[in-house]
Amino acid sequence: AQPAPAQTLSWFDGALVPAEELTAGLTTHAMHYGSGVFEGIRAYATDDGAAVFRLPEHLERMRKGAEMFGLPFDAAQCALATLETLRANGHRDAYIRPLAWFGEGSFGLDVEGHVPHMMVATTATHVHLNGSRARLGVGSWRRNPADSLPPLKLCGGYVNSILAKREAKARGFDEALFTDRENNVVECTGANVFMVRDGRLTAVEHRDALPGITRDTLLQLTGAESRRVPLSELLDADEVFACGTAAEVAPVAQIEERVYGDNPVTRELQALYARVVRGQEPAWRHWLTAV
Ligand code: PMP
């Protein structure tokens, strides 16, 4: 392993630069209108060195998002940039943030004439980001409906998550749970939802929810069912957890007044997920890209 450099480097438009030198002009289209797309990816230390978990799947989702508004995006270049940045920083357990966006130009919605940019930043993660059991509030904000804004990681779409998270926190919760007008569960502000009821594992499915890669990982690992879930059923479940790249498998302690008890199935899945991402489950090593 190389010693970590004194200064964290980020990849920006083809070169590694000190992270603090990442800057964008004030006419940046994405800053005014949200015309960017990002990913949240993780690398883990394995016995064979650092590896990125499900890198092609993350970059394919990013490519789809970029395509929605005509932003040029080269997934192969982004993959190389990701590996180069991790190596340059000597990061092993890391959170990776690629972002592609339309930059400087005139004020106006047309993206034509705006310069496309791409950056990749990495930060070391020393522990699981999901230490504690989350308390969820069911707020008043609806998730962006898929027929208004596709559930991809488009920068502008995250204002919706910010509103919901702020509301949940103001009400004393840690995180928001989105429900639709018919009281079906959608997802959290940055994670998908599963429940365990009478020993049966179910992934919450909803057209407005981001197609999460962690959710897909758990579905493939367990063969769990995936279907629409009314909030009433979630409140009646034995265990509920949220999942996402950053959250990993995060047990839910409470939704509004409903307090959940012990969560043995969630703990088992947390442990399984931890082994899979670290290359300790040979059957799933094809999900890892060596750094
Ligand atoms: N939903 C939303 C809104 C998210 O931002 C995320 C994080 N990317 C997720 C779900 C979980 O997706 P993934 O497992 O691909 O990280």
Image (cartoon, rainbow, N blue to C red):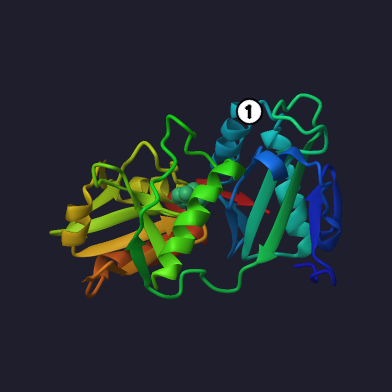
Query: Position of 231 compared to 191: left or right?
Result: left
Q: Nearer the viewer, residue 57 or 102?
A: 102
User: Which residue sits at x=64%, y=41%?
Assistant: 34
Residue 178 screen position, x and y as percent:
36, 51
Q: Which corner quadrant of the image does residue 127 belong to?
A: bottom right
Tell me how many marks there are.
1
Q: Nearer the viewer, residue 41 or 223?
A: 41
The three-letter amino acid code for the residue at tag 1 is Phe
162 up-or-down from 184: above or below: below
Crowdedness near tag 1: few (<14), some (14–19) or many (≥20) residues, C-alpha within 10 Å? some
86 up-or-down from 206: above or below: below
Q: Is residue 241 visible?
A: yes
Q: Quadrant of the C terminus?
A: bottom right
Q: Nearer the viewer, residue 212 or 29?
A: 29
Query: Position of 205 compared to 17: left or right?
Result: left
Q: Nearer the viewer, residue 228 or 32?
A: 32
Q: Which residue is mark 1?
A: 69
Residue 79 screen position, x and y as percent:
69, 43
Residue 9 screen position, x and y as percent:
81, 60
Q: Which corner quadrant of the image does residue 44 belong to?
A: bottom right
Name the element at disc 1: loop
